Amino acid sequence: MDSQLPNNLTQGSAILGYGETKRSYVKYVAAFFAAVFLSAIGAFVAWALLSPFSLPAGTLATIALPGKTNLPDSTPNVWRKAALSGSPIMLGLARSGKGLEYFVVEPRWIASDDAISISSGLLKTVFAGAEIPTINERPATSFLSQALLKARGNSAFLTLWPEQDTTRKPVSGNIKDSQWKTDLAVSTINDDIVLEGDNYIDLRALPEAWTTVSPTLMDRFALDIRQIPDAIGWDGIDKHDPTLKLVFTEPLNDETLDELYAAAGQTKTANYRLADGSVVPELLTPDATEDKARINSLGMPLEVILTGNNLIFQKYIPTETKTSCGERRIAAIDTESLPTSIPELRAMQERRAKLIFSVDRGNLLVCYQVINK
């Protein structure tokens, strides 16, 4: 008997050719781990960007620097050490109850020794003082945009914060080649008023400067005027023979003239009869009306020069001093006139320099120029 059975099925049938094989899950596992990895990266980036960093409540200025920046020896140690770390950082200056507070915002992995600090996300704020001041929180994106994008190569990014005034925007911009290009729009004025000397301010372009400089200047010259000048200049403010220059584009009123005469010590004597019939001399300021016609005849703008006991009225003649700083100068400050009570400003005073404020394409431009003694 034949034990072999005949095979009558069609050869090559797709059904009969099907066999059981093991299914591969490698690609699914790889996709799973890739999704987990990307989710972790996304969570890390969100954590880094959304975690705020700390700034003292009285912050006056911050400056973002690229890594490996050499700072002068006169700068605070907390600044110099952070600048040499090789990582982008933000230096800060704040006002506190004890004076000025210096701090640094930097990546949290940079060693800060025994200095006190506050960490949040990838960043930490290191304070030079022994106590943590009152702080405000800022988004990490502002640090990253300034330190990584705006402060690159030879550039730094400086921001001046309006103290205790949340309605005013901070003034900021890049610093490169001794020029600070700010985002502060300055009013356009057709006729220039540029005073000669190392210290002057065009108050029509910078009207808010009057409230800052007038108390010191007015106290120094014993002058209190209500009529705000259009420009003001000074020299030798800390010396025995200071000079004050005022430019007016409107006629002086009688009260202003009286104040100018009194500041110059110019007086006249008038006799005053008392009730008992006796006569006593009285010191009076010169009668403004006597000089009003003469002063008005000089024309406008009018320049008033006050030096010692000298008071000069003359027609103002604009100067045409060329400058490499911006399109039109509106102010200048000699660094020797800056307050010496701030240690960090003494380094600027070791080499006499001038800060020139100009209008450039509608915005404020500040230039630092060294003056050869």
Image: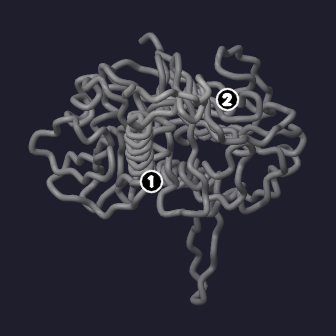
User: In the image, what residue type sits under mark 1?
Assistant: Leu
Q: Quadrant of the C terminus?
A: top left
Q: Quadrant of the N terminus?
A: top left
Figure check: 86 above or below 324: below
Q: How many marks?
A: 2
Q: Quadrant of residue 82?
A: top left
Q: Quadrant of residue 284?
A: bottom right
Q: Nearer the viewer, residue 61 or 4?
A: 4
| Element under disc 1 | helix
Figure check: 100 above or below 25: below
Q: Which residue is mark 2?
A: 358
Which residue occupies 82% across, 58% down?
289
Q: Quadrant of residue 68?
A: top left
| First in residue order: circle 2 vs circle 1 | 1
Where residue 71 is drawn, which disc sits there? none
Figure check: 227 above or below 87: below
Query: Do residues under tags 2 and 1 come within 8 Å of each other at their CB atoms?
Result: no
Q: Residue furthest bottom?
A: 275
Q: Which residue is mark 1?
A: 50
Q: Residue furthest front?
A: 1
The colour mode here is one colour
Which residue occupies 76% across, 33% down?
193
Mark 2 burial class by Cα count in 10 Å: few <14, some 14-19, many 20+? many
Q: Residue 210 placed where, x, y %?
A: 62, 51
Q: Residue 28 placed where, x, y %?
A: 43, 40
Please identify, in this view, whether the residue under mark 2 or under mark 1 is nearer the observer: 1
Which residue occupies 34% across, 61% down?
135
Q: Residue 185 placed where, x, y %?
A: 72, 41
Q: Residue 80 placed where, x, y %?
A: 25, 29
